Amino acid sequence: AVVTNSLQVVQKLSAKTQIKVINIGGTFDRDTQAFWGIDTEHYVQDHFFDKAIFSCRCINQDGSIFDSRADTASLRRRIVQNSTTSYLLADHNKLGRTAFSRVCYLSDIDFFITDKPLSSEWLGCFERNNVIVDWDGKVTP
């Protein structure tokens, strides 16, 4: 089963009859095309996930993962806490920046999936935090 607050994910997976899709609901935000709010938080708080796949606004060199909205950061933080394995998806442009609200730390995630090879400095940062890096299908332990 796939659990999501994203309307776009629900729409894309609805044609896949072999996948059970669970929309966690909440208040719909037209800008993000997703559901947020207290009901969404409560659902995530009361459930446990095998795998969490999420994105972020940016990652700074101290190993903090950020989002621009506090409600988004809070929900993502709870999802990571309630997951066995977490996958962070972010393009290379999100590295080396800071945003409004901390989601979690690199040490809280298991995998980082990005679009380009990372510099040795960034690879070292992920390695120190025991995060496996994957870009274009090429895994760096």
Image: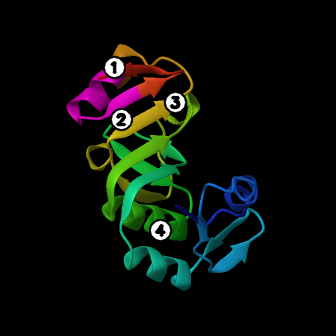
- In screen coordinates, is 105 left or right of 72? left
Q: Report which residue position mark 2 lands on.
A: 61
Q: Secondary structure at mark 3?
A: strand
Front disc: 2 or 4 = 4
Q: CA distance from mark 3 to mark 1?
A: 15 Å
Q: CA distance from mark 1 to mark 4?
A: 29 Å
Identify the disc placed on residue 114: 3
Q: Secondary structure at mark 1?
A: helix
Q: Quadrant of residue 115?
A: top right
Q: Residue at position x 73%, y 63% from top?
A: 33
- Upstream in the sequence, badge 2 or badge 4? 2
Residue 140: image location, x then y, percent:
35, 20
The boundaries of the magenta stretch are 123-133
Q: CA distance from mark 3 to mark 2?
A: 16 Å
**Quadrant location, the C terminus:** top left
Q: Specify the color scheme.
A: rainbow
Q: Residue at position x 73%, y 59% from top?
A: 14
Q: Report which residue position mark 1 lands on.
A: 121
Amino acid tagged 3: Thr
Identify the disc placed on residue 75: 4
Amino acid tagged 2: Gln
Q: Residue at position x 39%, y 21% from top?
A: 139
Residue 126 versus residue 87 in the image, above or below = above
Does 45 lie within the magenta span? no
Front disc: 1 or 4 = 4
